[in-house]
Image (cartoon, rainbow, N blue to C red):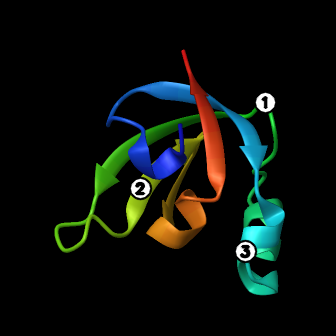
Amino acid sequence: MRLDELPLRQTAHIAAIDWSALDDKGARRLRELGFDEGVEIEALHRGLFGRDPIACRVGRMTIALRKKLASAITVRPE
């Protein structure tokens, strides 16, 4: 399942990230924020219009991601 499909308040682990689907800026941002395989993630909130952006908790950080970035992240729900 992709991160943009993960139900709210459900935790998951990142199974894979499709780096080739991301532009250089988006890929760099994800790497700097600690996104990697095996990291625990939780979808917290989705925007009203187009359900974009998606607020996620990674560790103790809350991060807003555009739907395009979230769709490149495959997660494994717990």
The image quadrant of residue 21 is bottom right
Q: Is residue 59 visible?
A: no
Q: Position of residue 56 (x, y in %)?
A: 48, 49
Which residue is label 2 attached to?
55
Q: Secondary structure at mark 2?
A: strand
Q: Nearer the viewer, mark 1 or mark 2?
A: 1
Residue on which the image places disc 1: 38
Residue at 40% across, 59% down:
54
Of labels 2 and 3, earlier in sequence is: 3
Q: Name the amino acid, label 3.
A: Leu
Residue drawn at (54%, 15%) of the image? 78
Nearest to the eye among marks 3 and 1: give it: 3
Q: Which of the two discs, 2 and 3, sits closer to the camera?
A: 3
In this picture, is 44 found above or below 46? Answer: above
Query: In the picture provided, is 73 more to the left or to the right than 70?
Result: right
Looking at the rendered structure, the kind of residue marked 1 is Gly
